[in-house]
């Protein structure tokens, strides 16, 4: 086998192995993400059940972004001049 043939074979073989490695990694990442999402949903369900059992009102999911409260419509109080002004 000539050196060039060997290097061509090596490049093809390692390229295929790298492609398989990345494909396997993507599948494992997708599976882990799905497991994480499932666990988070189960935790939300448990928190809701606990809130119901304890009578706690106003359950909010810490994993969900909630809108900020509206700003006060009244202007800020004026600063008083303590020098008699």
Image (cartoon, helix red, strand yellow):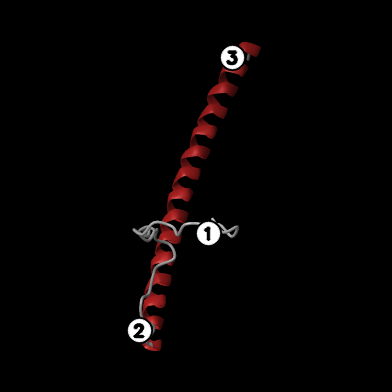
At x 36% / y 59%, what residue is drawn?
74
> Is disc 3 in contact with disc 2, using a CB cutoff of under 8 Å?
no
Residue ID for mark 2 = 52
* Number of residues whose C-alpha sits closer than 10 Å to that of mark 3, classed few (under 14), some (14–19) or many (20 or more): few
Residue 34 percent coordinates (x, y)? 41, 57
- Does 30 sit above or below residue 40? above
Instruction: Tell which tag, 3 or 1, sits nearer the viewer.
Output: 1
Q: Earlier in the sequence, mark 3 or mark 2?
A: 3
**Farthest-out residue, right:** 3
Would you identify the image quadrant in which residue 55 lies? bottom left
If you read the primary sequence from the N terminus, does the residue marked by circle 3 or circle 1 appear first? 3
Q: Report if residue 2 is visible in the image.
A: no
83 to the left or right of 26: right
Measure the alpha-carbon separation of dots 1 and 2. Answer: 49 Å
Label 3 or label 2, whichever lies nearer to me, is: 2
**17 or 80, which is in the foreground?**
80
**Disc 2 residue crowd, few under 14, some 14–19, many 20+, Cα 10 Å:** few
Residue to which mark 1 is pinned: 80
Picture residue at 52% right of the left edge, 39% below the top:
21
- Residue at horizontal 53%, vertical 27%? 15
**Residue at label 3?**
5
In whole angstroms, how far apart are the C-alphas of marks 3 and 1?
88 Å
Q: Position of residue 53 (x, y in %)?
A: 37, 87
Please say whether residue 4 is visible from this viewpoint: yes
């Amino acid at each position: 086998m000539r050196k060039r043939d060997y290097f061509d074979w090596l490049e093809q073989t390692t390229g295929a192995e790298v492609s398989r490695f990345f494909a396997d990694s993507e599948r494992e990442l997708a599976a882990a993400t799905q497991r994480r999402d499932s666990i988070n949903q189960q935790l939300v369900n448990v928190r809701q059940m606990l809130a119901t059992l304890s009578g706690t009102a106003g359950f909010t999911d810490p994993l969900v972004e909630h809108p900020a409260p509206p700003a006060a419509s009244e202007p800020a109080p004026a600063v008083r001049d303590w020098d008699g002004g």
